[in-house]
Amino acid sequence: MTDARAIIARIRYGQGLTPDDARWFARGLADGAVEDAQAGAFAMAVLLRGIGADGRVALTQAMRDSGRVLTWDVPGPVVDKHSTGGVGDTVSLILAPALAACGAYVPMISGRGLGHTGGTLDKMEAIPGYRALVDRAMLDDVVQQAGCAIVGATGDIAPADRRLYGIRDICGAVESVDLITASILSKKLTAGLDVLVLDVKCGSGAFMPDLESARELARALVETANGAGCRTMALITDMNSPLARSAGNAVEVQAAIDVMTKPDTPHRELRNLTCALGGEALALADLAADAEQGAEKILAALKSGHAAERFAKMVHCLGGPVDLIEQPRKYLPQYGEECRREPPIGSGRQVSAIDTRALGELVVQMGGGRLRSDDKIDHAVGLIHLARIGDRVADGDAVGRVAAHTEAEAARAFARLRSAYTLSADPVPSQPLILDRITA
């Protein structure tokens, strides 16, 4: 006989999780048959004993199928990307339209900010009129018209995960790779994907601070998604520096538009990672011979303006201004860009280390993120012109600037910004952006 206690006991005794048990438990989470105490015991048993590769696939599929799963009738592959979260990581805003310009269809179901990391939906909602929560009919229409749609999950998407997610936090089982994997993928795979590319961050601004833990998570994600029938690979990327040279909501939308419209964009690492992830996605989707050719196609879509056209179409279809690309500063909320220069620090000093998490936390403290789930976001505040590791900081120059309400707020924020940076007179070795590539 199957019940919650029997399933928990089997996991506790190291017997893993079968597909039947996973389906029963996911249904119980969704319809309330599983009590909170049982869900907490389940999460703790998984954390302590694990459920193995087969169990991860079973739990992912069961939680995916606990709600609505999308299907598509489009003349091309359905593709998406997921990042484990970082600072200045605005790849999604560029990659979705670039993939669409290359023949893919991208229903990108995204989330809001989590801790020190910015949320894709929060960034998109810095655009006046943009509707991030839409019904299925509108989602279909936007994907058909623009080739991509960056939207939020509705209440009927993976309800089993939504319930387990909150209980994991309360009972102290957040760190389980099995549960992290199933949580991420159960939501992503509800979009009916053919292909998924993953960006697993590693470093001072990431949830996975060291390379080995990032590899463990990346392997679990790739193995599980492939086991669930979605062609998937992952790049492990550096998050010891902010990816874009901006952090915040409106300022990151501006950075994304700059990458799509300016060949000489200062956000080169952001553009390079977008091309690398897009190249992998196009290769997996059989829209390019290999990742290198795929990256060239993504870069061509950016340089030609075709990606910007798709982004503009998506924004307008979802309620935003028709001319956002042409006049972003007319629409994006912004405060005065207060520049606080440091005292002279000596010519030739280089940035040798950054507490990148502290930069993300600073944006949150300024009002650009949430300290409580019901907090309202100030989309205009943020950090701009941020230096990265290896950058040379000239005599008397600043490591970044602050966009804030007032001079006093900007001054306080700049003091915290400067304290996140370490400068050195010694040469600083270059930092590779892509640390590893996981395909199986």
Image: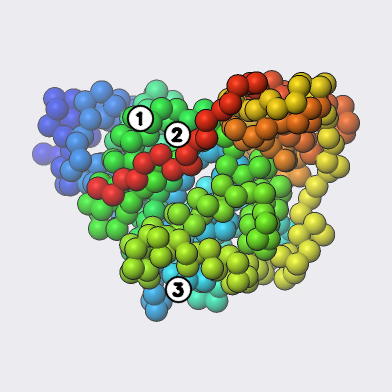
Q: Mark 2 points at which residue?
A: 202
Residue type at mark 2 is Cys
Q: What element carries label 3?
A: loop
> In the picture shown, does residue 157 fall above or below 326?
above
Which residue is at 37% across, 68% downward?
Answer: 288
> In the picture shown, does residue 367 fall above or below 258?
above
Q: Position of residue 260 (x, y in %)?
A: 63, 62
Q: Position of residue 1 (x, y in %)?
A: 11, 39
Q: How far apart are marks 1 and 3 (CA)?
A: 34 Å
> In the picture shown, does residue 90 fall above or below 193?
above
The answer to whether 341 appears left or right of 29 in the picture is: right
Do the residues bearing badges 1 and 2 touch, measured as CB atoms within 8 Å?
A: yes
The label number, if any, that marks residue 103 in the structure image: 3
Q: What element carries label 1?
A: helix
Q: Mark 1 points at which residue?
A: 213
Residue type at mark 1 is Ser
Occupied quadrant, residue 397? top right
Which residue is at 41% across, 39% downward?
Answer: 435
Q: Which residue lies furthest to the bottom in this view?
A: 75
